[in-house]
Amino acid sequence: MAGSGGHAKSADYVASVLTTAGFAVSKQEFPFSYSTRVDRLSVDGTQIPIIRMYGTPSTSAGGVTAPLDVVAVDDTSGCGTSDYTPDVVGKIALIKRGGCSFAQKQVSAEASGAVGVVIYNNTVGDLDASLGEPAGGMIPAGGVTAAAGARLAALAGQPVTLELRVVVEERTTFNVIAETKGGRKDNIVMLGSHLDSRWRGPGLNDNGTGSAALLETALQLGGNAKVENAVRFGFWSAEESGAMPPPGSIGLEGSIHYVRSLTFGQQLDIAAYLNFDMLGSPNVGYFTYDGDNSDLVGAGPGPYGSAQIERTLTDFLKNAHGVSVEGTDLSGDSDYFPFSTVGIPVGGLFTGANEIETSAQAAKWSGIAGAPFDSCFHQACDNLGNINREALDRNADAVAWAVGIYATSTESINGIKRGEAKETTQKAVERSSERNLTEPVGASLDLACNDFA
Ligand code: DTR
Ligand code: ZN
Ligand code: ZN
């Protein structure tokens, strides 16, 4: 997660191996709002896993400690004040799920004098729930499993500590940018992936897979490679919003910071940006970014040249691996967004998140219809066991193929031929008009991000 020691170690490693491989490497620091959360329930010195209910107020640091009051179990346990005895005053109420909304249980407990609520599940699995309207969130409330509930029900009167808190603080994190020493600096091929994970887990598919594919491609290319066009790699931080993102937060903070830091001329020097975010989803879908909006749904086409990138990636996966690819909409949900907003042609690969794979997709990709592409998306289980290695291998080949093609020539994207003299400013302005740029860059990026938010 951005701002954590884990991200810093990952980014330092990437910077180190790319420096050793001969790249010109820089770290681009930027401030961001680090938000994480403490969800803690302890009793008898042991911790019981608990998930804060969405909408609950936070406790202070250290939480609230009070005796446990076990509310009688019936079909509507804890749904009305008549379910509570005067004993619950000043205590933390343990309530079984069922019979009414979580908000109603919480409001009834608060009205009866409880200082906190622990609701346990009435079915298998975690209880990751919401109190609905904020009006329901008056005392701290969290959910535990049925097994934890049974254990707690035997501890009536024991002191328990309930700490449910969001930690938000201004921190600094950094992107890693690496560029070949050779190649044209006015026609750069850029590729990127985010190196940070979601707050709940290690993020091996999202986005260890994209970062690993990019890093290995860079190391195989080498920073001293003889290339026609310079190749630049961006390993972004803070793509994932924090544990409790502010309303409207779109994340993408590292790539947005990067594009905003470029002058207009520096943006024109980038011939294309290719993004790789989730390349190894277990129940794999093979998607390329729909640069020409041929699926006619959602967002429109990308900037001129995006369709050609889609074609290159689609044809490679078909010809080299016999994979039939579908388009995924350029709807702004990863780090290509700030680049496309300023008119830079974009493309990329994706293997699916928590969307459900259809029967038709399962048939062509040998997957499981009706199941998510990645059931551990943004969860703690997004670990090394959550990677479809065949999918990662195929997609990594496509990343390398695209680098080989575009480091040699971007003519199919922007018409610039190999060895063509550096274009005049007039031509650059004409080219930028092809990118439908109508106002200064920063404004269009702000506009788009605000729109998006
Ligand atoms: N938002 C990305 C995952 C994601 C969802 N849809 C797409 C489409 C294209 C690339 C990535 C994604 C994340 O959670 O990092
Ligand atoms: Zn993610
Ligand atoms: Zn991602």
Image: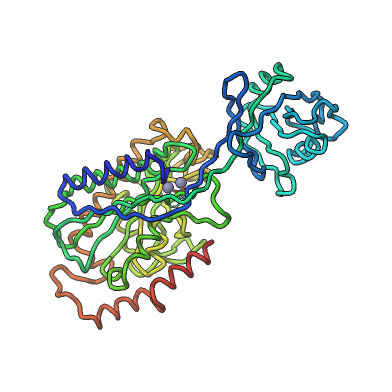
Q: Tell whether 165 sits left or right of 108.
A: left
Image quarter for residue 7? top left
- Nearer to me, 359 or 412: 412
**Considering only vertical position in the picture, is 365 above or below 124?**
below
Number of callouts in the render?
A: 0
**Considering only vertical position in the picture, is 380 above or below 70?**
below
- Nearer to me, 35 or 380: 35
Q: Residue at x 39, y 48 (%)?
A: 277
Can you see residue 358? no
**Considering only vertical position in the picture, is 255 above or below 423?**
above
- Nearer to me, 167 or 259: 167
Q: Tell whether 269 sits left or right of 388.
A: left
Outermost residue to the right: 82
Can you see residue 281? yes
Residue 182: x %, y % from top left = 14, 59
Q: From the image, which quarter does the N terminus lie in?
A: top left
Residue 450: x %, y % from top left = 52, 66
Residue 289: x %, y % from top left = 40, 57
Q: From the image, which quarter does the C terminus lie in?
A: bottom right
Q: Tell whether 15 sits left or right of 203.
A: left
Q: Residue at x 43, y 55 (%)?
A: 252
Outermost residue to the bottom: 426
Q: Residue at x 64, y 21 (%)?
A: 147
Q: How is the image coloured?
A: rainbow
Residue 178: x %, y % from top left = 24, 53
Q: Residue at x 64, y 31 (%)?
A: 162
